[in-house]
Image: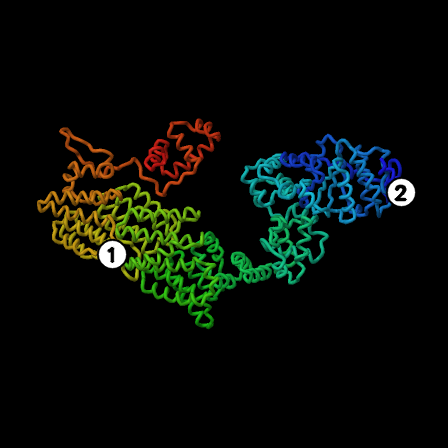
């Protein structure tokens, strides 16, 4: 070709005609550099990577870029060995930085694989330069080929000469379809990759793709004679980040262990061949500044140049980190100038830090904590404070950030509590005492909580500082302590102090931590509810229930909804109470958090509603669930304790165990101030128990402890008076009711039944029937059965009349009437309307779950459903388990019946 002739005839470019046997320096070619590396017996071919590599045949340039030991070379060798077209392999060495030497080896590799004829254009003879005409001749020669040649340059990261990169780009561009260039490297080559990427002419296989998956790790370990379950292999992959060399070296070491699985789980990276590999390949040969930087940042989960500078006390981190990342030196870029080290490399560096710079690690953690605190990274600040053992610094960071509420609520509340569990008695700052107080109060240890709170306040007074954040945190804890102690006046004073302090706190901190205000108002609302100030409690609790803030405010939102549900129940709105209680439960379940007190109170309200609907088994299940769940704020908190007392005592009364009901009616929580509604309910239970024992006079006497301010209790007291033969006292109670539009159906139903009994006793059956009809209409909407079931024998004949029976049928007297001979209706009190109780939480089925449920209703088997939906049988079974769980059933027939009851089918 003309280009080749010109290349051979240039006087200023000496060439060797024929077959050269030496490079331009006169050294013989090292033939091992042209040979594909041999594959070890434990090599695992990963078909997904081979398939990706095949794209290299369609693009001029392929880049295989990964860290040392990532498996790049063996992957490329395995792929190249399976190609039909010629493959020229060249392992680049440091001496190839001289252009003439590099190109001489490229020419020879092409000739060795048969891609160039022996009489083709010659090769460079000058080690320091290559004439452009010779490269043009090579490009023209390659462009003329019918089938492309694949040129693999392994360990191309050793090539740092910009001149060679420009020459390589020239040849690649002009070779056209005759050349497929594959660069295997640890670093980014000095080529315009962006241009190749933009035109779709670049195939890239990088570190993330080179990493082994858990399944591939299992297969690799099996080649080493190790048989591990997938979960153990997954843990190893997580620790090694799927790094090929790390997996292989760990497998080799594990083979020598008596318990390979345990070894791979617990091995110390700094005492293995993995450490030897990384230290030799990555750390050795670095400058002293780079080594020092790597050792110091090993204490960090992630870092940026400024943070690294804070640890080294220098200002050179930015270029050093950028260079290490370019070289794939086991440092990963996270974006926005943040980096992190490979986990194994970090372990090894930390071990070396302790050996080379003993005693420095705590100071590095302290420097990191201070920088992170100034930069607003609170969770990492606390972690480094803990690692440094500087608990005063940790507590100060938490309180100054106004984040003490995070010890009670949010996704990380458990982690924070665990972190501060290591704090010793030597930490004596006001903030440290506040953290101790918060920890005690979160466990309902009121005495210790108040003791720590007083110490914090005393030390604030002693040092004369008292930053607004610290004092506002004190007010929050004071309000919680007052709530748990049953002291509404103290809660009001603490809340007033908090209101004043909010004006002194930077607004951005209040916006950053909405949980503090939400918690404070929830505690205040709970204290007001305990005091019987229902409307004042509703005002603050409603505001908290609508608070935004995501997971940070889940606890106060759920608690507020639970308290609002109890308020509705105490006002006689059982349907509304149920809806709010379900909202409280769902709020926590949606966030995926452990059930806090708000969810517990919600379940207690649901239990009380179930008792009123005579769903006694369901009520018992809900009570059992809250008794076994970990509900720390429900152990000493008066309001949930009273809620449990209401549900449990009423359930026991309905089951005929009056003595146990009296015991259960007492909340059993020591309080500073008695609650009027809790005390009234306890008196009601005592009265009902005495009436059941046949002591009407004693029952009436017990009612003196019932306040008439709460209509729902007053109505029940009136019913007891009527049953005790005191109709005048019953009427007086009803006449004295002050509902003011707040009382719900439980009040109107109960009052109507008391008046109906009085009318029937005076001989006015028509009025009695009219009042019972009104009660049935009001109760049917709420499925309120308890007032009728406890009304006594007088109501049975009335309910047997056709007009009243029609109103009661299907929800109070069963699905249908039972008739004796002669057509007379026999009432069956307490008959359940369904075989099982409705689900606890409003059912929300996914689309696929609905598909499965619909086919279940057609009596299709799991196999038939799978075939119909084109899914596996296991997938169908998984959906069935989810459907059963959501519908609160255990069998398919029950699931279908329940779904039909709920209108899902």
Q: Position of residue 418 (x, y in %)?
A: 47, 54
Residue 663 appears anywhere in the view: no
Pick whichever, 625 or 155, lies toward us: 155
The image quadrant where one finds the N terminus is: top right
What's the image's color scheme? rainbow
Say left or right for 826 vs 73: left
Residue under label 2: 10
Q: Residue furthest left?
A: 763
- As helix, strand or loop, the secondary structure at mark 2 comes to loop
Q: Is residue 215 above or below residue 373?
A: above
Q: Compared to 564, does 392 lie above or below?
A: below
List x then y, in percent, for residue 668.
29, 55
Crowd rating for badge 1 (residues with CA inside 10 Å; few <14, some 14–19, many 20+): some
Query: Is residue 202 found left or right of 266 in the rendered image?
Result: right
Q: Horizontally, is 220 left or right of 509 in the view?
A: right
* Camera-side residue of 33 and 894: 894
Query: How many C-alpha atoms fall within 10 Å of the one at disc 2: few (<14), some, or many (≥20)?
Result: few
Number of the label disc, if any, that sits on residue 679: 1
Image x and y of residue 30, in percent: 81, 40
Secondary structure beneath disc 1? helix
Give the quarter of the image for residue 250: top right
């Amino acid at each position: 070709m003309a280009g080749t002739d010109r290349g051979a005839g240039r006087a200023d470019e000496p060439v060797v005609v024929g077959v050269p046997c030496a490079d331009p320096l006169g050294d013989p070619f090292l033939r091992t550099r042209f040979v594909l590396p041999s594959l070890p017996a434990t090599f695992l071919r990963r078909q997904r990577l081979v398939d990706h590599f095949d794209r290299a045949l369609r693009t001029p340039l392929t880049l295989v870029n990964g860290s040392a030991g990532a498996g790049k070379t063996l992957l490329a060798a395995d792929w190249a060995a399976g190609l039909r077209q010629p493959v020229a392999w060249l392992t680049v060495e440091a001496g190839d930085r001289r252009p003439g030497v590099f190109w001489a080896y490229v020419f020879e590799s092409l000739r060795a694989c048969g891609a160039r004829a022996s009489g083709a254009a010659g090769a460079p003879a000058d080690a320091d330069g290559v004439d452009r005409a010779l490269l043009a001749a090579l490009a023209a020669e390659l462009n003329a080929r019918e089938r492309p040649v694949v040129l693999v340059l392994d360990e191309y990261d050793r090539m740092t000469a910009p001149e060679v990169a420009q020459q390589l780009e020239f040849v690649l561009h002009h070779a056209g379809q005759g050349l497929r260039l594959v660069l295997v490297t640890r670093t980014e080559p000095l080529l315009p990759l962006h241009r190749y990427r933009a035109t779709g002419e670049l195939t890239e296989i990088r570190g993330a793709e080179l990493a082994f998956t858990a399944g591939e790790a299992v297969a690799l370990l099996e080649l080493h004679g190790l048989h591990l379950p997938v979960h153990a292999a997954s843990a190893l992959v997580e620790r090694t980040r799927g790094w090929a060399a790390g997996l292989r070296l760990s497998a080799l070491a594990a083979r020598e262990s008596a318990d390979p699985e345990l070894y791979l789980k617990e091995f110390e990276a700094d005492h293995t061949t993995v450490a030897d590999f990384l230290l030799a390949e990555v750390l050795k040969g670095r400058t002293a500044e780079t080594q020092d930087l790597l050792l110091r940042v090993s204490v960090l989960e992630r870092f940026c140049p400024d943070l690294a500078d804070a640890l080294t006390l220098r200002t050179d981190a930015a270029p050093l980190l950028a260079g290490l990342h370019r070289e794939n030196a086991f440092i990963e870029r996270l974006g926005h100038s943040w980096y992190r080290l490979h986990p194994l490399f970090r372990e090894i560096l930390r071990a070396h830090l302790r050996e080379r710079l003993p005693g420095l690690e705590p100071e590095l953690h302290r420097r990191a904590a201070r920088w992170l605190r100034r930069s607003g990274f609170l969770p990492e600040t606390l972690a480094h404070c803990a690692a440094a053992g500087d608990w005063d610094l940790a507590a100060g960071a938490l309180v100054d950030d106004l984040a003490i509420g995070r010890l009670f609520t949010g996704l990380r509340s458990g982690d924070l509590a665990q972190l501060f569990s290591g704090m010793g008695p030597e930490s004596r700052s006001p903030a440290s005492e506040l953290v101790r107080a918060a920890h005690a109060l979160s466990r309902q240890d009121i005495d210790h909580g108040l003791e720590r709170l007083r110490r914090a306040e005393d030390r604030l007074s002693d040092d004369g500082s008292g930053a607004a954040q610290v004092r506002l945190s004190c007010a929050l804890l004071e309000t919680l302590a007052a709530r748990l102690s049953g002291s509404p006046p103290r809660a009001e004073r603490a809340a007033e102090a908090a209101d004043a302090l909010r004006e002194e706190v930077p607004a951005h901190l209040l916006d950053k931590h909405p949980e503090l205000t939400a918690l404070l108002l929830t505690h205040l609302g709970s204290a007001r509810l305990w005091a019987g100030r229902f409307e004042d409690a509703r005002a603050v609790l409603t505001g908290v229930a609508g608070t935004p803030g995501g997971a940070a405010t889940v606890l106060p939102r759920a608690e507020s909804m639970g308290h609002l549900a109890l308020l509705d129940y105490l006002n006689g709105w059982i349907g509304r109470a149920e809806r709010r209680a379900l909202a409280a439960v769902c709020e926590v379940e949606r966030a995926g958090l452990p059930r806090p007190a708000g969810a517990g109170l919600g379940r207690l309200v649901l239990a009380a509603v179930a008792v009123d609907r005579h769903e006694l088994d369901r009520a018992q299940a809900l009570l059992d669930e809250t008794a076994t769940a970990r509900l720390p704020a429900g152990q000493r908190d008066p309001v949930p304790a009273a809620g449990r007392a209401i549900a449990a005592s009423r359930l026991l009364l309905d089951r005929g165990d009056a003595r146990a009901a009296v015991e259960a009616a007492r909340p059993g929580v020591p309080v500073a101030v008695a609650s009027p509604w809790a005390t009234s309910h306890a008196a009601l239970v005592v009265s009902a128990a005495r009436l059941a024992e046949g002591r009407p006079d004693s029952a009436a006497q017990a009612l003196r402890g019932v306040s008439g301010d709460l209509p729902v209790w007053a109505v029940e007291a009136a019913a007891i008076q009527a049953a005790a033969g005191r109709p005048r006292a019953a009427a007086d109670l009803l006449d004295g009711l002050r509902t003011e539009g707040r009382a719900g159906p439980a009040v109107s139903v109960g009052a109507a039944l008391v008046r109906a009994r009085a009318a029937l006793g005076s001989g006015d059956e028509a009025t009695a029937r009219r009042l019972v009809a009104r009660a049935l209409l009001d109760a049917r909407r709420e499925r309120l059965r308890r007032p009728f079931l406890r009304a006594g024998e007088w109501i049975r004949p009335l309910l047997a009349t056709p007009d009243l029976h029609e109103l009661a049928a299907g929800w109070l007297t069963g699905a249908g009437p039972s008739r004796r001979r002669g057509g007379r209706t026999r009432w069956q009190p307490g008959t359940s309307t369904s075989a099982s109780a409705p689900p606890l939480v409003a059912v929300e089925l996914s689309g696929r779950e609905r598909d499965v449920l619909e086919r279940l209703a057609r009596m299709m088997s799991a196999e038939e459903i799978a075939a119909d939906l084109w899914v596996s049988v296991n997938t169908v079974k998984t959906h069935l388990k989810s459907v059963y769980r959501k519908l609160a059933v255990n069998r398919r027939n029950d699931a279908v019946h329940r779904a039909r009851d709920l209108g899902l089918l």
